[in-house]
Amino acid sequence: MTPLLTQVKNCQLCASELVDGVRPVVQIDPQAKVLIIGQAPGRKVHLSGIPFDDASGDRLRQWLGVTREVFYDAKQIAIMPMGFCYPGSYTASTINNKGRSGDLPPRSECAPKWHDLLLQHLTQVQLVLLVGQYAQQYYLPNKPKTLTETVQLWRTFGPRYIPLPHPSPRNNIWLSRNPWFEDELLSHIRQRVAIALA
């Protein structure tokens, strides 16, 4: 596993496209029981090199019912985003962004290049949390069109996969409009995570 992680950390596949430079952020260990597949590091995570080291991570840890110590123990929780490096922001990019704001989508090269290779080593994983639409589109090809419908139908993707909205503060409106998420799904997730890590 170490040689593969070294290759990932030294990846230059998208170097020419990344305004802020290359810094793959992953957390992988063959003993991990829970795998989080998110979107891509944000600017703060890019600077620290620590996955979900931001407000999104605070909320995600609350959703899972785990401490920072548990969350950052690679032997318990693996973290493998769709894009390993910070993709940059719309405001910093040179493309015609049509008024969009926030971070660009994850680079599309990472998952096809690295995910299968890393998953071959994650044989102990009991639960995969698909955080955000990009992970869900990749791993749930027959999912409904919208994230809301996908998360509402979480029971149909089990027991291995559970789709989640992104825990970003930018999704506060979504959370307020979908109280069933906290009422129905979060207790199930906490229970599944606790069982997997026991």
Image (cartoon, rainbow, N blue to C red):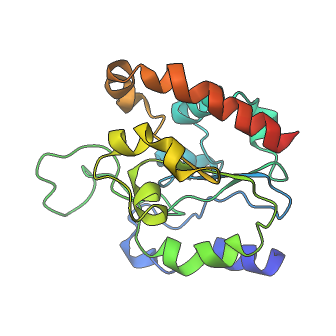
Quarter of the image where the N terminus is located: bottom right
Q: Residue at x 86, y 59 (%)?
A: 31
Location of residue 26 in the rendering, given as x and y in whole percent from the top left corner: 65, 59
In the rendered view, does 95 fall on the left or right side of 168?
A: left
- Is residue 141 visible to us here? yes
Location of residue 140 in the rendering, given as x and y in whole percent from the top left corner: 45, 61
Viewer-side residue, 113 vs 144: 144
Location of residue 101 in the rendering, given as x and y in whole percent from the top left corner: 24, 43
Q: Residue at x 63, y 25 (%)?
A: 187
- Is residue 163 visible to us here? no
Does 149 sit above or below residue 93? above
Quarter of the image where the C terminus is located: top right
Viewer-side residue, 17 vs 137: 137
Location of residue 194 in the rendering, given as x and y in whole percent from the top left corner: 79, 34
Q: How many marks?
A: 0
In the rendered view, does 141 fall on the left or right side of 191?
A: left
Does 174 sit above or below residue 147? above
Q: Residue at x 39, y 51 (%)?
A: 133
Viewer-side residue, 166 vs 4: 166
Does 198 sit above or below residue 140? above
